[in-house]
Amino acid sequence: MDFGTLILAMSIPSGITGFCFWLLERKLDRNEKRRKEQEEIREEQEFLMVKGIGAAIALGEASAIALKNGHTNGETEAALAYAREVKHEQKDFLTRRGIEAIY
């Protein structure tokens, strides 16, 4: 067996192994990218949930003050507007995520 044939015979398994590792690395990179995207979506969802809780508390507080004083005031209207705004943000987020999940 000459030297060139020996080099060729030794390089084939190395090439196959390198190709397999390249495929594995590509798959891991795709999975990591998908995981990061899902983490960003989860963070946005949690942010909207916290805003929704804050809106509900503000609305409850304004309602309690209005009930205590016997009349509605500007606080009630502002809290109601804020609660509506947050509700629409959450609805838009869920609609967008639902459409993206379809495609």
Image (tube, rainbow, N blue to C red):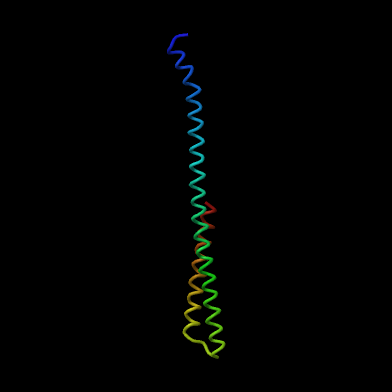
- For this orientation, the residue located farthest to the left is 4
The image shows residue 78 at horizontal and vertical percentages of 47, 79
Question: In the image, is residue 17 above or below residue 101?
Answer: above
Q: Which residue is drawn at 49% across and 50% down?
A: 36
Question: In the image, is residue 87 above or below residue 37?
Answer: below
Q: In this view, does 72 lie to the left or right of 3?
A: right
| Nearer to the camera, 69 or 96 | 69
The image shows residue 17 at horizontal and vertical percentages of 51, 27
The image shows residue 101 at horizontal and vertical percentages of 54, 53
Q: Residue at x 56, y 87 (%)?
A: 67
Q: How many labels does the image show?
A: 0
- For this orientation, the residue located farthest to the bottom is 70
Q: Which residue is drawn at 56% across and 79% down?
A: 60
The image shows residue 5 at horizontal and vertical percentages of 45, 13
- For this orientation, the residue located farthest to the top is 1
Question: In the image, is residue 7 above or below residue 102?
Answer: above
